[in-house]
Image (tube, rainbow, N blue to C red):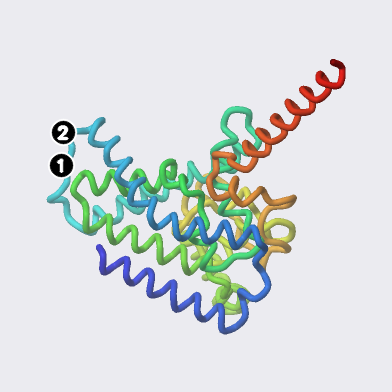
Amino acid sequence: MGNLIHWVFAVTGVIFIAELVVGRHRGIYSRNDWFVNTICILFGLLLRPLSAAAIASVLAALLPQWKGALAGAPFLPSLIAIVLLGEFANYWVHRLSHQFKGARHMDWLWRMHRTHHTGKYVNVLLNFRTSLFWTLVGGLSWVLALSLYLGLALPAGFAVTLFMLWGIITHADFRWDDAIRAHPRVGTAFRAMEHVLISPGVHHSHHGYGRDGGNFRNYGIMLAIYDWMFGTLYIPKGRPFRYGIPGESPHWADDAFAPMKPAEWTHGLRNGSRSHMQAEGAIDRQD
């Protein structure tokens, strides 16, 4: 599995360098972006193994008798099952995270996912811009962890690699699919394929708003079948009018550490302390 992950980092590096060479990263990052991206990428690499260990502990407590139960299962059917179940779990957690935006008791789920949408661009770095705690609730994380726990290490490793590579391709700032989609001969077949597989254009639209944008569409990572099945598939004609989400971005600390709100809490404590001092001053003046 380690060798597979090396391929993921190699492909990421090649595409990142290509984006740099053609200027796709020039002048697009705010101060907020630098903080959020750095924290999410560096700390994310450290915390994801801890998150995986936490999920494994939960599974061991709930299903002690199932450890290694499917160790002898054939590779290909296991891989297909993991991909289908992983996509299904991801689809619903991803979709609900958007639908719960502003919900009284569930807005925390949106805040955890919002980190991936506050960047006003789409490129390979955005693929790694997720809340440090998203792994704990992501449906795909639990399916992959369960697969490993059941003894399906090899197919789970291939599934992780497929999902990561596909995410890199669909987040890359190279829209090679636009020309294919618009081609008079192969465009129709390509659009039909987009009902099954997520293309860069389909995923870019999920990160956009306005013309050809659709934050509440296209929740799949690699497979579009669940979007198609549940009526959330949108195939765009071009790039979205804008990337990101409308409105002011949250403080970088609230973004990176969502659903916690360290900046908001600190601000509240400062305001509370200031109000307390002002009240004491008013009492002293009255005395």
Q: Can you give x and y, in whole percent of width and height, for residue 201 in the image?
A: 58, 66
The answer for how far apart the CA atoms under marks 2 and 1 are is 8 Å
Nearer the observer, 136 or 68: 136
Q: Quadrant of residue 76?
A: bottom left
Amino acid on which disc 1 is placed: Ala
Residue drawn at x 54%, y 40% as measured from the top left: 259
Q: Residue furthest right?
A: 286
Q: Quadrant of residue 239?
A: bottom right
Nearer the observer, 138 or 200: 138
The label number, if any, that marks residue 156 in the structure image = none
Residue drawn at x 86%, y 21% as measured from the top left: 285
The label number, if any, that marks residue 65 in the structure image = 2
Q: Can you give x and y, in whole percent of width and height, for residue 90 in the image?
A: 44, 47
Mark 2, Cα crowd under 10 Å, few <14 / some 14-19 / many 20+, is: few
Residue drawn at x 25%, y 57% as measured from the top left: 155
Q: Where 58 sits versus 128, above or below?
A: above
Q: Where 173 sits versus 271, above or below?
A: below
Q: Can you give x and y, in whole percent of width and height, for residue 32 in the image?
A: 64, 58
The answer to whether the residue labelled 2 contacts the one labelled 1, judged by CB atoms less than 8 Å apart, is yes
Amino acid on which disc 2 is placed: Gln
The label number, if any, that marks residue 69 in the structure image = 1
Residue drawn at x 30%, y 55% as measured from the top left: 80
Mark 1, Cα crowd under 10 Å, few <14 / some 14-19 / many 20+, is: few
Task: Classify the position of the C terminus by image quarter.
Answer: top right
